[in-house]
Amino acid sequence: MDIIERATEFEHRKHKFITTSDRIIASREVKGLILEINDIYKESKDPDLMDLMKRLTVIKQKIEKRLKGRPLTSS
């Protein structure tokens, strides 16, 4: 269960990404973790894995929101 250890380590890591490239790398990493956990979840149907995927998805959404930035306002 190395993937679960990596996912929990990512979850507890500080999420202060200074550069855009750091955010892109983190977003790709968490996406890969979610997909790998999903493959395991399809076979086992373990509710703990689903909870872990949900928590990682929230982190991923926050990173991607920061990547997109604020919309430009037209006045």
Image (cartoon, rainbow, N blue to C red):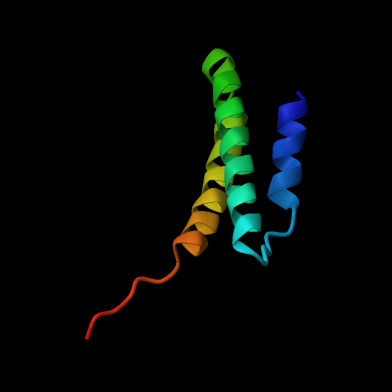
Q: Is residue 41 above or below residue 55?
A: above
Q: Can you name the residue that lies furthest to the left here?
A: 75
The x and y percentages for residue 8 are: 72, 41
The C terminus sits in image quarter: bottom left
Which residue is located at x 75 percent, y 53 percent? Answer: 13
Q: Can you name the residue that lies furthest to the top here?
A: 43
Left or right relative to 62: residue 70? left
Is residue 37 at least partly visible in the picture? yes
The N terminus sits in image quarter: top right
The x and y percentages for residue 51 are: 57, 37
The x and y percentages for residue 12 are: 74, 51
Q: Is residue 51 above or below residue 61?
A: above
Which residue is located at x 63 percent, y 48 percent? Answer: 25
- Which image quadrant is residue 6 in? top right
The x and y percentages for residue 50 are: 55, 32
Is residue 47 at least partly visible in the picture? no
Left or right relative to 75: residue 6? right
- Which image quadrant is residue 40 in? top right
In the depicted view, which residue is nearer to us: 59 or 64? 64
Q: Is residue 13 above or below residue 68?
A: above
